[in-house]
Image (cartoon, rainbow, N blue to C red):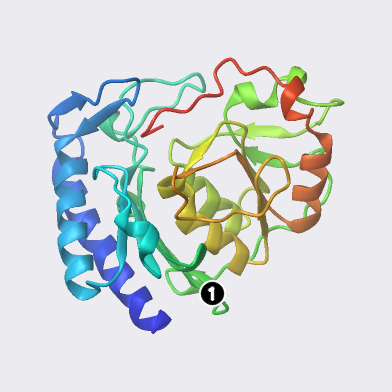
Amino acid sequence: MREADLKLLLDAGEAAGEIAKRYFKADPEVWDKGGGQGPVTEADLEIDRMLKSELLAARPDYGWLSEETEDGTARLEAERVFIVDPIDGTRAFINIDGTRAFINGEPSFSHALAIVERGEVVAAVVHVPMKSLSYAATLGGGAQCNGVALQVSGQAEMAGATVLTRKPDLKREHWLAPHGMKHNFRPSLAYRLCLVAQGRFDVMLTLRPAWEWDVAAGDLIIREAGGHVKTTAGAPTRYNNPHPQLAGMVAGPVKLVENIIKGLQPAAKRPIAGLIIPKGD
């Protein structure tokens, strides 16, 4: 069943990519969601409609959670749930790291699709259409990118580790001691997780709450590439929560994740300014 589910997600990710390509650098219509949730484009909405229609037609008994669909409680009763982000990396501003997103022509946006069974991700795809990359994993079946097996790096110590995160998360005030990690960034959280699974960077870190649709697919891909995923408090990650957010995330090689969690200031002592994350960021 998981292999069939994975094929379903791979096909859906490819179809999402074809829609996104039509809108990429084509000045799509953009709306502000209001309430600090950020922007949404006509591409996000068309992809969301397509994914919901195609995936639920194939698996009508599965629940549904998407960034661009109004949430409800029915998914909480489902044994299996689709958790998707139609476009991860939409936001329409130049952020503090100097990078742009889908609306501005940044090609490293992604489509993130996961199937969760009783809180655990069992199948996942992250498709990066402008780079022709499809990352995929099933629980116990390993992780691949375009058919090539993935493996996290062997980095164990924070000093010298390459970390995909926002610059503010590396500020001294968040850490018990100087950490020595080297900053990198991509606008899509899902793609950041996949780059770590691929061993191109050592670890992904976000101190801000993470929406489930941004990280569920990448979570499994990291794990199946030999890595470790925890909240910044060191708790295990579980999905399809009533409020679909996790309390931050650290993902990468097991020892490095453990050392980062040990190196963080307790949450009560970390500055909270800028740590609230809107939908779509």
Q: Is residue 110 left or right of residue 222?
A: left
Q: Is residue 33 left or right of residue 84?
A: left
Residue 233's quadrant in the figure? top right
Residue 117 in the image: state x and y as whole percent: 46, 69
User: Which residue carries the number 1 mark?
Assistant: 139
Q: Residue placed farthest to the right in the image?
A: 177
| Viewer-side residue, 31 vs 156 | 31
Q: Quadrant of the N terminus?
A: bottom left
Q: Residue at x 44, y 55 (%)?
A: 240
> The disc labelled 1 sits on which kind of residue?
Leu
Q: Is residue 174 left or right of residue 4?
A: right
Q: Residue at x 62, y 18 (%)?
A: 272
Q: Quadrant of the C terminus?
A: top left
> Callout 1: 10 Å neighbours few (<14), some, many (20+)?
some
Residue 133 in view, yes or no: no
Residue 157's quadrant in the figure? top right
Secondary structure beneath label 1: loop
Residue 119 in the image: state x and y as whole percent: 51, 62
Asked if residue 24 is positioned above or below residue 4 in the image, the reply reads: above
Q: Residue placed farthest to the bottom in the image?
A: 1
Asked if residue 151 is positioned above or below residue 267 in the image, the reply reads: below
Residue 13 in the image: state x and y as whole percent: 29, 61
Residue 51's quadrant in the figure? bottom left
Residue 181 in the image: state x and y as whole percent: 75, 34
| Viewer-side residue, 5 vs 98 | 5
Residue 202 in view, yes or no: yes
Q: Residue at x 64, y 65 (%)?
A: 151
Q: Residue at x 51, y 24 (%)?
A: 276
